[in-house]
Image (tube, rainbow, N blue to C red):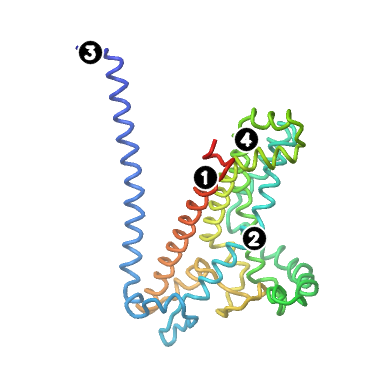
Amino acid sequence: MATFSPEIEGVQHGDRSFRGLVLIGSMAMIALLGGVLVLLFVYSRPAIERYGFSFLISSDWDPVFDNYGAAPYIFGTIVTSVLALLLATPFALGAALFISEYTPRTLGSVLSFIIELLVAIPSVGFGLWGLFVLAPFMRSTVDPFLRNTIGPIPIIGELFKGPTIGQDLLTASVILAIMILPTILSISREIINQVPRLQKEGMLALGATKWEMLQKAVLPYAWGGIIGAAMLGLARAIGETMAVTMVIGNSSTAITPSLFTPGYTIASAIANQFTEADTPMYFASIVELGLVLLLVSSVFNILARLLVRRMNRLPGGAGAQ
């Protein structure tokens, strides 16, 4: 008959206790998310029952006649977040590769520390900088340049037409890109550092150049993690409030292809109008905006997990190692 020493029994008891605590913490997070969903649904139920699916596709937002539609806010949220992701990811990935593979360790640590300090800047700080520095620069320099050079080109030129006022969807996208860049960079750098050294040295020993080693040994292994980092940045961009509210204009509900159009995101609309919701239907519609924001974030997160899983299954991906 097997016997166990008190030391082994104590370790097993500690493992069971820790497992129970972790399980309780995990279930608490799920319960918290469920509670938020229930709360948002209960308070937004009058708007859901009155407008139904048309709330998502209607552009009419008129508190005077109690007609509400979230399409312009959803459009602004998706446009600014996706454009911010497209702007930030190449810079973040390039910086991560440079810090991990090209710079000396000491210099790389200093650069990483400086870039990651951006995370410590509060959202309102970014907003003030965007309002007083970035917006005037965009209005006087960047927007006119884009309008004059790309504006005449068919199809793509529609993105850069109209008056340049500096407080628009493009400026909001730029400020979001700056805010999410440290997140994408930090995680990408850690993922790149996890690529097995023998894998990189083997490529170099076979006569590959530095770029060929990065292209064929590092990036295929790290793609899943890099995409995951980008999706975390996207999640922050979707929910960002104050900085976007201060530079996006908050003066139009028109859905147009031009990035020079002032607009709203869901978060900025809630921040601007929540205290003005003086009727039950107005309040319910504002709360439903919060529910829609949560659903939009969930959809992007689900798509991100599917994309990461697919990338990891590709030949050379981390999941194939």
Q: Is residue 23 left or right of residue 289?
A: left
Report the amino acid beneath label 2.
Ile
Determine the CA span between mark 4 and mark 1. 20 Å
| Quadrant into which the C terminus falls | top right
- Is residue 88 or residue 275 the one in the foreground? 88
Determine the CA span between mark 2 and mark 3. 65 Å
Q: Is residue 69 above or below residue 212?
A: below
Determine the CA span between mark 1 and mark 3. 44 Å
Report the amino acid beneath label 3.
Ala
- Is residue 146 or residue 150 the one in the foreground? 150
| Quadrant into which the N terminus falls | top left
Q: Which residue is mark 1?
A: 313
For label 4, count other residues whose C-alpha is less than 10 Å away and answer few (under 14), some (14-19) or many (20+).
some
Mark 1 residue element: helix
On the image, which quarter does residue 79 sit in?
Answer: bottom right
The label number, if any, that marks residue 141 in the structure image: none
Report the amino acid beneath label 1.
Arg
Q: Earlier in the sequence, mark 3 or mark 4?
A: 3
Determine the CA span between mark 2 and mark 4. 28 Å
Report the amino acid beneath label 4.
Asn
Q: Earlier in the sequence, mark 2 or mark 3?
A: 3
Q: Which residue is mark 3?
A: 2
Q: Earlier in the sequence, mark 1 or mark 3?
A: 3
Q: Give how far across and how far down residue 111 sits, in percent.
A: 70, 40
Q: Which residue is mark 2?
A: 175
Name the residue located 74 percent from the left edge and 32 percent from the top edge: 104
Single out the mark in the foreground, 3 or 4: 3
For label 1, count other residues whose C-alpha is less than 10 Å away and answer few (under 14), some (14-19) or many (20+).
some
Q: Which residue is mark 4?
A: 193
